[in-house]
Image (cartoon, rainbow, N blue to C red):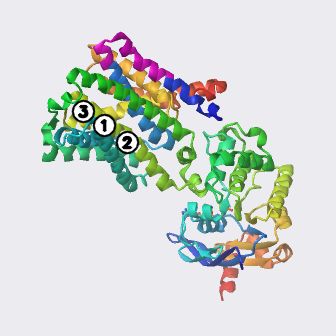
Amino acid sequence: MKNWRNHLGLLLPMLVVIGFSLWPVITGNISTRESAFTILKAIALASSLNILLGYTGYVSFGHIVFYGFGGYIGLYFVNQQDWSIWAGMLVGGISAGILAFLLGKAILRLRGAYFALATIGINEAMKALFNNLDLFGGPIGMVLNFSVYKAYGGAAKALGMAFYIMAGLTIIALIISHLVRTSKFGLGLLAIREDEDAAEVMGVVAPDTKTWAYVLSAIIPGMVGVLFFFKNGNVEPHVAFPLHSSIELLVMVMLGGQGTVLGPILGAFAYQGMRGYFVTSEFFKDIQLSVSGVLLLLIVLFIPAGAVGWLRQKFPTLRRVLQ
Amino acid sequence: MTSLLQVKGVSKFFGGLQALNDVTFELPEGQILGLIGPNGAGKTTLFNVINGVYPATEGQVIFKDQDVTEAKTYEMAKLGLARTHQIVKPLNELTVIENVVVGACFGRQGYSLRKATPVAEEVLNFVGIADRSDQLASSLNVAQKKRLEMARALAAQPHLLLLDEVLAGLNQSEIAEMVETVRKIRDKGITIIMIEHVMEAVMNVSDRMIVLNFGAQIAEGNPDEIRNNPRVIEAYLGDPKLAQKLMQKAQE
Ligand SMILES: Nc1ncnc2c1ncn2[C@@H]1O[C@H](COP(=O)(O)OP(=O)(O)OP(=O)(O)O)[C@@H](O)[C@H]1O
Ligand SMILES: [Mg+2]
C-alpha cells in the first residue's frame, strides 16, 4: 500500500485488541473469556459512539438505544423465525441503522444540550414501547429456545463462537472508526465538530453528513446487541435499554480521548477495570453510578481531551502513531 | 453571462430592526467591489443574505443566472461562492492545512483528499502562512487567522469571493501585503466584494464602490466619485439625524 503511513494510526489499536482477544484463547479459561467479552463489547460500543461524539461533536446520552433496538429485532428473527445468528446480526445492524437515519432527520438539527436530552428521551420512549409490544414479549421479553444453540453444536460451542464474533465485530468497529477518521467524510465531521456554521459556509452539507455519521455509529451497536442477547439467552426491556450503560460509554470515550481511534479502547479498559474494583468493593458497589458521574465531571474539567488527546499534546512526535 | 451577481430590492428585518433597505446592484465578472459604511450599516448582513446564512425578507439574489434567494450556505459554496468572516471562525483543533483542505474538499471543486492537499499547500503559500501549516489553527494570531480565512475561501477556487474586513486589526505593512494579495486574487479572475473600514486601502483597490448607511444604499460609483460625494461624507460624520434626512430624500 502506497500510503501505508496514513494507516499507522490503526496499528496500535489493532495490536491491542487482537492481542487481548488471544488472551482467553491461550489460557482457555472460561471466566477470562467472559471478562474479555465484556471489555471487547465496551470497546466496540465506545468506538461506535466515538464517531458521533468524538468526530462529529454531538453528545448522545442515549446511544444504547441502538444496541437494544437492533438486538431485539435481530433476536426475534433468530429465535422466532429460525434465522442464523449471522442473518440475525445483519438485520439487527440494519434496523439500528435505519432507526438512526430516521432519528437523525428529526433530532440532529438540535444542537448541544437539546440533542443530548432528545437522545435520552428516545431511549426511554423505546424502552416503554418494547415494554408494551406483545410481539417481543412485553415486559418479560424473549427467552431463547434452547434448540437455537443446537445448530452451532450445543450451548458451550455457541458461547465460544460468540466470543470470536465479538472480537471480529470489535475489529470491524475499529476499522470503521479509522476509515472515517482518515476520509474526506471524516474531515467533514471534524469540521462540523469545530464549527458547524463555518463548515457549512465551506460547503460541508452538515445535515446529511451528520445523519450518515449517526447511522454509522448505530450499526455496530445493533449487531452487538443481537450477539449479546443470543449469548445471554434472553432479552428484557430494562436489559436492552439501560441508560446508565449509555453514560458509562460516554465516560469511556471521554476518558480515553474523544475523536481518536485508540482513545475509546484505553477508556474501555480503564473504566471496566475501575468498575470491576467498584462492584466488588463494599463501599463503592452501591454508588457505582455516582462514581462514573463524578469521573465524567473530573474529565471534563481537567483533561477534556482525554488520555490520548493529552498524550498527543504532550508528545507531538507521537501523533502519527497515536490516532 | 451578464453579471455574476444581481441583488434585487433586498431588504432584511431582524424583528423590528431593518438591517437592509431595498438594496439593488449588479456585479460584473472580474471586478473588485468595495462595500463601505459606518458600523451597523448592514454590510455583514448583506453578505449573510447573499451567502444564504439567512434569507432576505424581501427581494431576490441571482448568482450565475440562478435564483439563489433561498439557497443554503453549502449550496452557495458548491456554486462557487466563498467568504471570510469578520469574526474569524477557525476550526481550532484542526491544523492550518487541514482547515484549508476542508475548503478545497467541500467547495466548488469538491476535490478528493489526495488532490486537496497540494491545492491547500499552494494556497497557503499564496497567502503567506505556509510555514504554519502543521500548527493548530487555534495557535495563530489574529492577522494569521485572517489569512487562514482567506486561504480556506480560495482553496475552494470560487467565482465570487466575499471579504469581510480582512484588513481590520492589521498594521500598515500587513495592510499593504494584504491589499497586494487581494489584487493578485482579482488578477486570477476571481470577482471580489470587499467590506472595509480602512478607507485609503479600499479606495485604492476597488473598481467600484457601494456605500451603505442604516441599511440603505446611499451612493455608488468609482472611488473618486465616492470620495467627493457629500452624502458619503455626511454619513461618516456620524450625525444620525442628518443621515436619516438624507435617506428620506434619497427615497423620494
Ligand atoms: N443575527 C442578527 N440578529 C439581530 N440583529 C442583527 C443580526 N445581525 C445583525 N444585526 C443588526 O443589524 C444591523 C446591521 O449589522 P451588520 O453586522 O450587518 O453591520 P455592519 O455594517 O457589518 O457593521 P460593522 O461595520 O460594525 O461590522 C446592526 O444593527 C446589527 O445589530
Ligand atoms: Mg460587519
Residue furthest to the bottom in view is B252
Q: Can the viewer see residue A153 in this picture? A: yes
Q: Is mark 1 on a helix, strand or loop?
A: helix
Name which residue lies at 67% across and 80% down: B247
Badge 2 residue CB within 8 Å of ligand 1:
no
The amino acid type found where label 3 is placed reads: Phe
Q: Please tell me in which quarter of the rendered image ligand 1 is found.
A: bottom right
Q: Does the residue labelled 3 lie within 8 Å of ligand 1?
A: no
Q: In the rendered image, which residue does mark 2 sit on?
A: A219
- B218 over A80 or under it: above or below: below
Q: Observer-nearest residue: B125 or B210? A: B125
Q: Quick one: label 2 or label 1, which is nearer the N terminus? A: 1
In magenta segment, residue A13: no
Q: Residue A229 — which label?
A: 3
| The stretch drawn in magenta includes residue A21 | yes
Q: In this view, does A169 lie to the left or right of B170?
A: left
Highlighted range, magenta: A15-34
Q: What is the quadrant of residue A156 in the picture?
A: top left
- What numbered label is drawn on residue A86? 1
- Name the amino acid type tagged 2: Ile
Q: Distance between the residues labelled 2 and 1?
A: 14 Å
Quarter of the picture containing the N terminus of chain B is bottom right
| Category of crowding for the residue at label 1, using alpha-carbon neighbours closer than 10 angstroms: few (below 14), some (14–19), many (at least 20) | some
Mark 2 element type: helix
**Quarter of the rendering occupied by the C terminus of chain B:** bottom right
